[in-house]
Amino acid sequence: MTPRVGLLDIGVFMPERWMSAAEISQASEIPEEVLIERFGLDGKHIAGPDDHVSTMAAAASIQALERAGVTADEVDVVMYFGSMGKDYYIWSAAPKIQDLIGARNAWSLEMSYVSCGAPVAIKVATDLLRADPDISTMVIAGACRESHFLDYTNQRSRFMFNFGDGGAAAVLRRGDEGHEILASKIITDGQFADDVAIYAGGSRTPTTHETVDAGMHFFDVGDPQSMKERLDPVSGVNFVKIALDTCAAAGVEIADIKLLAPIHFKRSFFDWIIAELGIPEERTAYLRRHGHMSGIDPLVGIDMRRDDLSPGDLVLCLSAGTGYTWAASVLRW
């Protein structure tokens, strides 16, 4: 019999500064009403100088442990699944988070990832908890400060102007406690691997005075038209497929989902997704005051709507990230 794994609780950290749509409009020259109505963005949190992915993920982890009633000494593994834009270049955030939260008995696992992170982390953690008898309790923690990698004058990257900052974490445990993780599924299409990146600073284009002067150390899109032509036919299809496939693997119907917690989409795509899935908007978490925060969006959405959930309710986490990977998880509250 497959061991049961439960999500005990979630923690969230949001930076103090909040950047309004009016401020984003001023920086990007995109009209405020377009940001609000088409981007679905009222504003977003912006990390301060002392808000790093390690500190934000650790703060969220401490809150999650407190809410779950779990001590740091009980944690066997600390997994980081957040943005690759970390405190330092070529550096692991997970050991730092493990130290900051005082999980002295844990080992750390680094899974730096993009926007599909939360469901992927839930799947990896669930599989580890089921497979390894020496692991009974895990903290999965992610954070994002990708707003600092935006060049608002680069219109090729305008679809990323909703990128905001924050941290989120969850405590998972093998056994009968917590909100049961029923299933997770993942799809990857590697043809999109090079479409979105910070193109300078790696081995292909090392950092030079010229790359810095050219502003190449911000997010960019190599060929926006080509990406759109290839992605549009498959993106929505794969979002719907991964949602339906995960529900089928969980043995539930999409109609029974009480909360859809997706990444932050532009408004028209969000409307299309929920129409295709048949989930009314009142049963969703739309992060219009947060924007998109890399892999943590679904956990933030669940936390935002937790008071609306009752025992037995089904929650669908739905994400995708450049690369391109679509992922989903189903939980029973």
Image (cartoon, grey):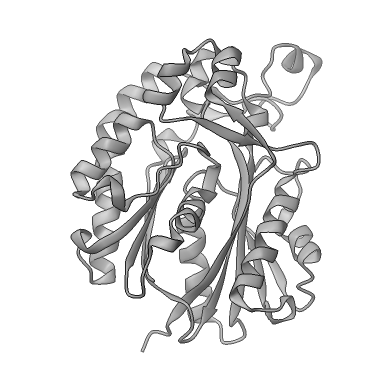
In the image, what residue occupies the spot 38% across and 31% down? Answer: 266
Does 289 sit above or below residue 1?
above
- Left or right of residue 315: residue 46: right
Does 207 sit above or below residue 48?
above
- Image x and y of residue 300, in percent: 51, 52
Q: Nearer the viewer, residue 72 or 249?
A: 72
Does 165 sit above or below residue 69?
above
- Farthest front residue? 307
In the image, what residue occupies the spot 62% across and 59% down? Answer: 141
- Image x and y of residue 99, in percent: 81, 65
Residue 197 appearing in the image: yes
Residue 111 appearing in the image: no
- Image x and y of residue 25, in percent: 54, 16
- Left or right of residue 106: residue 166: left
Q: Nearer the viewer, residue 196 or 169?
A: 169
Q: Nearer the viewer, residue 91 or 291?
A: 291
- Image x and y of residue 223, in percent: 45, 18
Which corner quadrant of the image does residue 186 belong to? Answer: bottom left
In the image, what residue occupies the spot 50% across and 44% down? Answer: 115
In the image, what residue occupies the spot 44% across and 62% down? Answer: 307
